[in-house]
Image: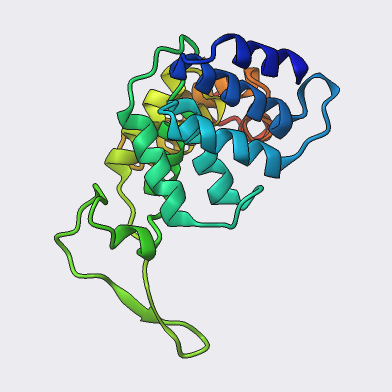
Amino acid sequence: VKYYKYQAQSHLGNEKMMAKHDQDLAEVYYFGIRNIERNANVAAKHFRIAAEAGNPRAMGMLGHLYSRGHGVPTDASKAYNLYKSGTSTKSSDRKGGNRMAHAGLGIYNLFGIPPAVSSLSNYDGDDDDDDIKYTNINGVEKKLKKVNYYLAREHLQKAANAGEISAYYLLGKMRMLGLFVRPDAKKAYSLFEKSAQGGNPLAKKMMAKMSLAGIGTST
């Protein structure tokens, strides 16, 4: 921690570099790197500082925190806006600084944009159709979430190209189910394999199931 603070002080006046140091420090606290005790509240503080300074990686990570309620209250609208800002901000990070933002937008579009988000003026989905409403078992009228498989695939592919292993897994699910793409078990298995190589346990589990059933593994 002292190292990152020292580095930040050495770049006083350089907003871009200071934002990067806040981003790095936030990840130290969020992931518990270098034996530092994990602290989502402190991580959120530094992610916010870096995001407000224009760091796209921090925007994506802060959006992730808002989507999960880690260190901040759960807020789908804030998460969506941060993801969108992260994808529209140019990143100079060779590791794909905005990959988390692309992954976040991909997930929202794949599983459904919450009504509170899809009603926003900056929502980039299809708003031509009237909202579909239903009444739940408690008699409360609710709106269905909106999905956009085209945007989901586009953002997840960008995230995967930047090295986001979870994106490979979700692209594999889309390929397996034929969501906006032709169903192809072999290609799905290949995508799961790439995700598994990065350590994704869900991808490893899916590969095991497919191998056991002999799906997508034949040459």
Q: Is residue 89 above or below residue 74?
A: above
- Residue visible at 46% across and 9% down in the picture: 94
Q: Nearer the viewer, residue 20 or 57?
A: 20
- Residue visible at 52% across and 88% down in the picture: 138
Res 88 → quadrant: top left
Residue 177 in view in this figure: no
Give coordinates of residue 134: x percent, y percent. 36, 79
Q: Is residue 117 above or below residue 31?
A: below
Q: Nearer the viewer, residue 116 or 179?
A: 116
Q: Is residue 61 left or right of residue 146?
A: right
Give coordinates of residue 162: x percent, y percent. 45, 18
Count the marks. Answer: 0
- Residue visible at 47% across and 24% down in the picture: 186
Q: Nearer the viewer, residue 118 or 82?
A: 82
Q: Is residue 205 above or below residue 107?
A: above
- Residue visible at 50% across and 24% down in the picture: 191
Give coordinates of residue 104: x percent, y percent. 46, 39
Q: Is residue 200 left or right of residue 75?
A: right
Q: Is residue 123 left or right of residue 22?
A: left
Q: Nearer the viewer, residue 177 or 15?
A: 15
Q: Is residue 121 above or below residue 161?
A: below
Extreme residue in the left direction:
128
Q: Is residue 70 left or right of residue 139?
A: right
Image quarter of the N terminus: top right
Residue 36 in view in this figure: yes
